[in-house]
Image (cartoon, rainbow, N blue to C red):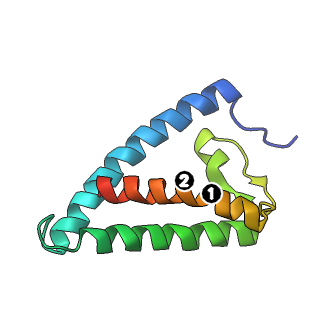
């Protein structure tokens, strides 16, 4: 008998728990990262934010390359195989405003 994992209702609760815990650690990490480069007034806030986005982009490419969606692990469910999204040049152009706003929101929270 294969391991099916937690029921969806438990998985949803665990997603919120891990999101909240991760958000707290994210805020602590950002504070520590900025303090390590001289604080918010040192002029390196955008550098830290850009490097964080770069590392996460590399992580996303690796996850697409191995075709595994690890998000379900946080809900105590088995990860699923996931193909690389099929995108066109038109899709990429349409996502530029959203990407710009997401990057701006990230930079504002660092």
Above or below 17: residue 54: below
Residue 26 is left or right of residue 64, and the answer is: left
In the image, taking residue 11 as reference, residue 26 lies left or right, namely: left
Please give the name of the residue rendered at 65% of the width and 24% of the height, measured from the top-left corner. 9
Corner quadrant of residue 65: bottom right
Crowd around label 2: few <14 · some 14–19 · many ≥20 (10 Å): few
**Are the residues flagged by discs 2 and 1 in contact, CB closer than 8 Å?**
yes
In this figure, which residue is indicated by the disc labeled 2?
A: 98
At a point 61% along the width and 27% down the height, the residue shown is 10
In the rendered image, the vertical position of residue 17 relative to residue 96, given as above or below:
above
Instruction: For mark 2, give the secondary structure.
Output: helix
Please identify the quadrant where the N terminus is shown: top right
Image location of residue 91, percent across then percent down: 72, 59
Residue extending furthest top? 9
Disc 1 is placed on an element classified as helix
Q: Residue 44 at x, y = what percent?
A: 22, 74
Residue occupying image coordinates x 62% and y 33%: 11
Q: Where's the C terminus, which quadrant?
A: bottom left
How many neighbours does mark 1 have within 10 angstroms: few (below 14), some (14-19), or many (20 or more)? few
Which residue is pictured at 55% across the width and 28% down the height? 13
Residue 109 versus residue 96 in the image, above or below: above
Q: Which residue is mark 1?
A: 95
Query: Between 84 and 65, which is closer to the camera in this rendering?
Result: 84
**Is residue 21 or residue 34 the one in the foreground?**
34
């Amino acid at each position: 008998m294969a391991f099916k994992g937690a029921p969806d209702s438990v998985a949803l609760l665990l997603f919120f728990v891990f999101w909240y815990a991760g958000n707290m650690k994210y805020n602590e990490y950002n504070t520590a990262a900025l303090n390590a480069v001289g604080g918010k007034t040192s002029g390196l806030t955008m550098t830290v934010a850009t490097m964080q986005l770069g590392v996460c982009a590399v992580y996303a490419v690796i996850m697409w390359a191995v075709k595994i969606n690890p998000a379900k692990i946080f809900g105590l469910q088995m990860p699923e195989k996931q193909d690389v999204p099929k995108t066109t040049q038109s899709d990429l152009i349409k996502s530029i405003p959203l990407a710009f706003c997401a990057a701006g929101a990230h930079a504002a929270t660092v």
